[in-house]
């Protein structure tokens, strides 16, 4: 069995399509939705884990491609390089899962790797390049 974490982008014409249902029903994939931002008439995005055999993954990915869904594989881990972090707190405003948060009363920025859904936002926006994605693991 292979488990991959994926970021999907849907065009606005597709947000009401039963895509996840089809992945489960047609290919017997196990899908765990970690975060979804789906609004009628707008583009949507979703972070999910997909588990199945290699063949099931290939079939599922082929369906997503056929439907025009953009798929971005996500690494499984994000690391913080402590000696680069200046505790500016900016990453707390872009983290969608609460994995980075301000701890009171000291107002220090904490990183809870267990809550990280590996969306990559902190990596993109940290001004000091203190957050780093491990790109070693991707869709196989
Ligand atoms: S944005 Fe970067 S430097 Fe600022 S608190 Fe977050 S990890 Fe640290
Ligand atoms: S990658 Fe960064 S912004 Fe995204 S969930 Fe993990 S800690 Fe939060």
Image: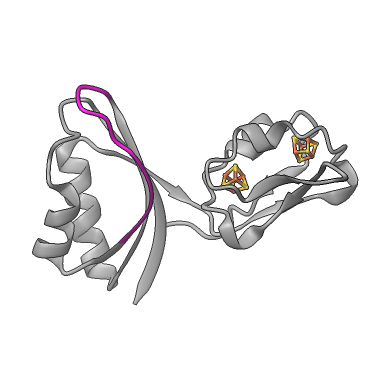
Q: Tell me: residue 1, above or below residue 41.
A: below
95 or 69: which is nearer to us? 95
Residue in the image at 20% along x and 22% along y: 41
Which residue extends farthest bottom?
1
Queried whether the magenta region covers residue 34, the answer comes back as yes
Q: Position of residue 67 (x, y in %)?
A: 15, 39
Residue sitting at the far left: 26
Q: Residue furthest top?
A: 41
Residue 39 image position (x, y, % from top left) = 26, 30
Please state the extent of the stretch shown in magenta in the rendering: 32-42
Q: Does residue 106 appear left or right of residue 44 in this picture?
A: right
Q: Answer with the quarter of the image where residue 14 lies.
A: top left
| 27 is within the stretch colored magenta | no
Of residue 61 and residue 117, the one placed in the foreground of this image is 117
Q: Position of residue 28 (x, y in %)?
A: 16, 69
Colour convention = one colour
The extreme front residue here reads 105
Residue 3 lies in what quarter of the image? bottom left
The one of 99 and 70 positioned closer to us in this rendering: 99
Q: Closest to the observer: 123 or 111?
A: 111
**Looking at the image, is 7 positioned above or below residue 77?**
above
Residue under the point 21% across and 46% down: 64
How far across and down, in percent of the image, does residue 100 sit? Answer: 67, 47
Q: Quadrant of the N terminus?
A: bottom left
Residue 4 visible: yes
Q: In the image, what residue occupies the spot 53% across and 41% down? A: 96
């Amino acid at each position: 069995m292979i488990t991959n974490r994926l970021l999907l982008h849907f065009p606005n014409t597709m947000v009401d399509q039963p895509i996840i249902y089809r992945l489960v029903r047609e290919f017997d994939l196990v899908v765990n939705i970690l975060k979804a931002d789906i609004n009628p008439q707008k583009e949507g995005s979703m972070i999910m884990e997909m588990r199945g055999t290699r063949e099931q993954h290939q079939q599922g990915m082929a369906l997503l491609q056929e439907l025009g869904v953009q798929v971005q594989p996500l690494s499984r881990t994000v690391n913080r390089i402590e000696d680069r972090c200046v505790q500016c707190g900016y990453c707390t405003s872009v983290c969608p899962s609460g994995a980075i948060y301000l701890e009171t009363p000291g107002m220090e920025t904490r990183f809870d790797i267990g809550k990280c859904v590996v969306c990559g936002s902190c990596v993109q926006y940290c001004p000091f390049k203190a957050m780093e994605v491990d790109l070693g693991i991707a869709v196989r």
